[in-house]
Amino acid sequence: MTPKTLTLAALLLGTAAPVFAEGDLNLYSSRHYDTDERLYSDFEELTGITINRLEGNADELAARMLAEGVNSPADVLITVDTSRLERAKDLGILQAIDSAVLEDSIPENLQDSDNYWFGFSQRARVIFYDKADVTPPTSYLDLADPSYEGLVCIRSSTNTYNQTLLASIIENHGEEVAREWAQGIVNNMARDPQGGDTDQLRGIVSGECEISVSNTYYFARAIRTEVDGLSDGIDMIGLQWPSQDAEGAHMNLSGAGVAANAPNRDNAIAFLEYLASDQAQQYFSAGNDEFPVVEGVALSPEVESLGTFIADDVNLSAVAKQLPLALEIFNDVGWK
């Protein structure tokens, strides 16, 4: 069975309308990875449930669910980063669920404290550097040291990964330290923030910067397959696992929750429980170079090649509550 897919752009332009079969699983997804097709087809084969998928930008999907209200056909919202999951909860478009499978399988710090959302894959946000030219900072806080002035490439303050990273620094170290850190990063930028995570890594290859911050799966992808402007220079880039003698490496999530008005609630819970299975967890790593959330699941060779590290086990539900302050700090220090 093939998932029925509609693009959000087509819907917004009025060229298509969502038609979802009763009793199926209606998935609103902002994960844009072709490799996820295997997750969906395997679930269909295991359960006989057909997935009908609506894809689009996370904020647009959330706005659509809010506008659809009680008539929304959405059963599950799947998206990336804790910040978006928490915003979906705050908008009232998710519902709390009880699932012993999810609560037992997924570490407590990687799920919402009220069971509105659950993390299913992790990405470490770490420091990369030019191995020939610089000794890298060993912690997130050291990245703001004046000795690195003019050397750092990092994404904009509108990026959800950076928002959650700053929120985690607030949670781990307090507001004053977080403000000093954000100001230090602005002072150390090699260029105004631009592009995505891959572009920060490309900046090292091109010589625009000597240090960058990126999620690990962008780097692992460039090892596994050809990424223009990056793979050819991958050997010059070193990876520094940050804060290994302190809180550990910051992990952000890809996760999902059951829609507030899910017409197929049981199917929705079944899908989330499937995402926590060893089969699905292993595919998150093999298909998209992410880290599983379930302990003991094997990593892909490319992810395993990144080495072992200590991950920050801060509760991401608590981190999410620091997001408004993180946005305030970004604005106050002039992080574009």
Image (spheres, grey):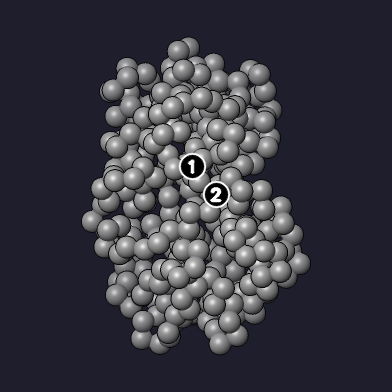
- What crowding class fits label 2: few (fewer than 14 Cα within 10 Å), some (14-19), or many (20 or more)? some
The reply to whether residue 8 is in sight is: no
The residue at 54%/84% (across/down) is 148
Horizontal side, residue 44 vs residue 98: left or right: left
Say which element carries label 2.
Answer: loop
Percent coordinates x, y for residue 37 in the rendering: 34, 36
Q: Residue furthest top?
A: 22
Above or below, 206 relative to 60: below
The reply to whether residue 103 is in sight is: yes
Percent coordinates x, y for residue 272 in the rendering: 43, 30
State which quarter of the image contains the N terminus.
Answer: top left
Horizontal side, residue 28 vs residue 72: left or right: left
Disc 1 designates what residue?
108
- Cα distance, mark 1 to mark 2? 7 Å
The residue at 30%/64% (across/down) is 307
Above or below, 267 relative to 160: above
Percent coordinates x, y for residue 134 in the rendering: 43, 85
Identified by mark 2, the residue type is Asn
Horizontal side, residue 128 vs residue 184: left or right: left
Are discs 1 and 2 less than 8 Å apart at CB? yes
- What crowding class fits label 1: few (fewer than 14 Cα within 10 Å), some (14-19), or many (20 or more)? some
Between 44 and 194, the one lying in front of the other is: 44
The residue at 40%/29% (across/down) is 101
Between 82 and 286, the one lying in front of the other is: 82
| Badge number at residue 315 | 2
The residue at 60%/52% (across/down) is 319
Identified by mark 1, the residue type is Glu
Say which element carries label 1.
Answer: helix
